[in-house]
Image (cartoon, rainbow, N blue to C red):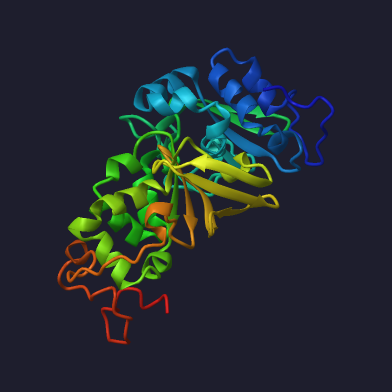
Amino acid sequence: ARVNPRSSRSHNTMATATTFLLQLVHDDAGLRFLDRAHDAAGLQPLFYKSTQPVTLWAPTDEAFAAFARDYPRLVSVLLSSHWLLHLQELLLFHLSRGTQLADSLTNGQTVPMLNGEAVTVTLGSIWLSPAVGGASAAQVTRQDVLALDGVLHVIDAVLAPSFLSTNALAVVQEKGASLFYSLIQLANLQDVVNQFGVTLFAPTNRAVWALGPSRLQYLQSPSGTADLQELIRHHIANGVYSTRFFSSGVTHLASQSGRRLRIVKSGLSSLAVNNARVVRSDSLANNGIVHTIDRVLFPGSIGTTNMPPSPSPILGGLFGSSQPNIFRPPVPSPSPRPIFSGFF
């Protein structure tokens, strides 16, 4: 990754530094993959247009080879355009703000990284965690390589941002769509959601609640199983599509239900899917990406029918007998609070 030769700095540079961080990476025969990754990620402006120094924790080629053994499918696509956000997230987890020299680090120190997460320092030697692989920490093997725009430390393992340990199903549960998570379980489609290379549009809890008792009871009844599975598949597209991947205007994606999704993008990041609005975009998973939406998407075959009610309560077994029936509007009560009381 070559730096912009015309770039300039307003911050003070170090007297012993003669080149920039990305040039140091480019010139080091042991950092070839990191060099290619920075080229693919397009993060060069973060270095040569910044007025603040940064610290680059640089995994060796051997470290990336070990990463590839742990995550072979991810590494095989990591430099492709569909996985750009994952690559950028990974690289930003190897950058911290300011010039952090080895002798300034303390045992147990938490170092904020530029992706918004943090690593923990352990001294003796210098170790950073979390990292990929059995050791779970990366050791600094070469320290305090000074640059005009910061400092570089070489490490022997790839640091592990949180998305590496989070699949799409876990993202659904964590991002305000726990009822959709329960429907996925009810449809027995966990493996479909967690297959590699998917985009999932996950309705919020409020969106699932808005379906009403009759439709939800039908979808969880034996006669509604096929429709429930088709409904879930209608929220999944093969391929990884972040917000930036869509052009302004209308794009169509094929869902796994066999029907098309109509994506409308306005401005830089505003997305709509059919009649639903994306309320949280680009949540990364180790097998793809999740967008949270404010309505349930219905394939045409079941979207306009009256679904017969079922006498059994929706998802009752999944929530346990001590939980209230989620079809009944929540009523004020002492602790524990009823499900959904915060929504209304």
Q: Could you tell me residue 77's position as x and y percent?
A: 48, 26
The residue shown at (27%, 86%) is: 334
Q: Tell me: 2 left or right of 123.
A: right
Residue 291 appears in the picture as rendered? yes
The residue shown at (41%, 48%) is: 234
Q: Could you tell me residue 306's position as x and y percent?
A: 34, 66
Depth check: 214 or 176 in front?
Answer: 214
Residue 184 appears in the picture as rendered? no
Depth check: 36 or 155 in front?
Answer: 36
**Among all residues in the image, which is located at the extreme left?**
321
The residue shown at (60%, 15%) is: 28
**Among all residues in the image, which is located at the extreme top?**
29
Q: Tell me: 310 left or right of 290.
A: left
Q: Quadrant of the C terminus?
A: bottom left
Q: Is residue 140 above or below residue 235?
A: above
Depth check: 128 or 213 in front?
Answer: 213
Asked where in the image residue 310 lies, by quadrant, the reply is bottom left
Q: Is residue 241 above or below residue 144?
A: below
